[in-house]
Image: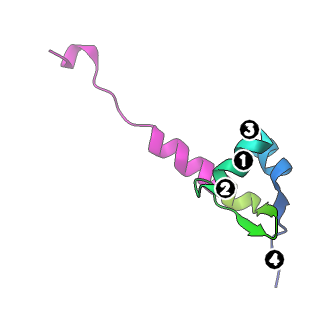
Amino acid sequence: MNCEPLIDAKTAAQILNLHERTVKEMAASGKLPAMRLGRLWRFRASTLDKWAEDSLLSNCHSRPSKENIR
């Protein structure tokens, strides 16, 4: 059985291009998929990638064009 290694908050921050503190705060609030082991936050890179992709898709919504607004 192959288990994906867990990464720390610093590495997760680099992957997401965010500040490490932001990553920890998002994890603590449940906005970012993570697990807490003692005092440390741990992440899976594949889960972060899926989260980022899903977040991007949910933020992409069509806006009405100026011609359709009266």
With 13 as the anchor, is 64 left or right in this view?
A: left
Q: Residue at x 69, y 62 (%)?
A: 34
Residue at image coords 68%, 49%: 25
Which labelled disc corresponds to residue 23?
Answer: 1
Q: Is 27 in front, or is 64? A: 27
**Is label 3 in contact with label 4 (beta carbons under 8 Å)?**
no
Q: CA distance from mark 3 to mark 2?
A: 12 Å
Q: What is the spatial separation of the Cα atoms under label 3 and label 1, in whole angstroms?
A: 7 Å
Disc on the earlier residue, 3 or 1 = 3
Between marks 1 and 4, how big is the CA–CA gap? 23 Å
In x, y percent, where is residue 2?
83, 79
Amino acid type, label 1: Val
Are the residues tagged 1 and 2 within 8 Å (C-beta)? Answer: yes
Report the residue marked by disc 4: 3
Decide: is 39 above or below 9.
Answer: below
Magenta region, residue range: 49-70
Look at the numbered discs 3 and 1 and tell me whether their residues touch, using CB distance below 8 Å.
Answer: yes
Q: Give the residue number, with chain letter if any, for mark 3.
A: 18
Tell me residue 65's x, y (percent). 28, 19
The amino acid pointed to by label 2 is Ala
Q: Secondary structure at mark 4?
A: loop
Q: Amino acid at mark 4?
A: Cys
Residue beneath the point at 33% across and 28% down: 63
Q: Residue furthest front?
A: 39
State which mark lies toward you, 4 or 2.
2
Mark before the other along the chain sequence, 4 or 2:
4
Residue 60 in the magenta stretch? The answer is: yes
